[in-house]
Image: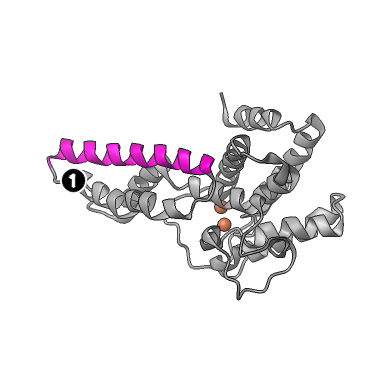
Amino acid sequence: MNQETNKLTLMECAGVSEADRERYRGMLDFVKECLAKPQKDQEHVFCINFDRYLHTERVLSWALRLYDGWEDKSRIDLDALITATIFHDCGYPTCDDLKDHAEESARIAAEYLPKAGYGEERAEFIAELVRYHGEKAWLTGRPAAVALAGAASMTTDGAIPDELTILMEADLFDDMGVMGIVMDTWIQAQTNAEVTFESIRDHINKYTLRLQYRDREKLRSDVAKKIWDEKTKLVQDFYDSLCTDLELPM
Ligand SMILES: [Fe+2]
Ligand SMILES: [Fe+2]
């Protein structure tokens, strides 16, 4: 099954109509163009050829999988979730500083959505989901001192909307598990002229393996925790097996 078929099947399972799937295809094409723009002169955090559009497609698949396993779907605005996920990183090439990419992505979404027939309130809600997707610490509680408008203000007691929870959790998934192992290896090959099996093992230990345990406590949903734990086991088993093969301590 190729990636496109997989994503469409996930959308079908979520009950998305053919007309809406076509609409999302148009949004994805728009975002693909945004991400193909030449990158402004920013400090590059990624030393590997990380395709941000393909990341967006993968995060969308994760968001749909998490939605599929979500206990109370009645609390979720699926269209807002899908739309925000499609737009969440589209501002990478045109932001002045990479840490402001979410703000730039929200600006692009807020400009696009009214033209695509979204009312002011819905467009603002979706743009806010995009704007705050990087605040992963909010998964464990939004700071009360932060004054917010739109989406985030629609919740109480420091909670965030379920759509934002799913977007954040889906975004976290793309760097973890086997993807994390591949990226650690790729980064080592790219940055270390003296790369060895041992240096790759150390890199996996320092990044993916550590983050599997550290970021577990950020997760809020049961479905995300279950998938995450499977990934942690896989990374731990991989790491242990690599240590055994290299005759190195674990
Ligand atoms: Fe992002
Ligand atoms: Fe992302």
The answer to which quarter of the image holds residue 182 is: top left
Say whether residue 125 is visible: yes
Image position of 190 with respect to 54: above or below: below
Give the residue type at disc 1: Met
**Is 35 colored magenta in this rendering?**
no
- In the figure, is residue 15 to the left or right of 204? right
Q: Residue furthest top?
A: 1
Q: Position of residue 94 (x, y in %)?
A: 64, 63
Along the viewing direction, whichever of 26 and 136 lies nearer the viewer: 136
Residue for point 60% across, 70% down:
96
The residue most toward the left is 247
Ligand 2 within 8 Å of disc 1? The answer is: no
Image quadrant where one finds the C terminus: top left
> Which residue is tagged 1?
250
The structure residue drawn at horizontal position 53% and vertical position 47%, both measured from the top left corner, is 51
Q: Can you give x and y, in whole percent of width and height, for residue 117 in the image?
A: 87, 50
Q: Quadrant of ligand 1?
A: bottom right
Please give the name of the residue rendered at 68% of the width and 52% of the height, measured from the top-left corner.
87
Badge 1 element: loop
Would residue 72 be found to the left or right of residue 244 on screen?
Answer: right
Magenta span of residues? 222-247
Vertical order, 40 against 222 (above or below): below
Extreme residue in the bottom direction = 145
Q: Is residue 33 visible?
A: no
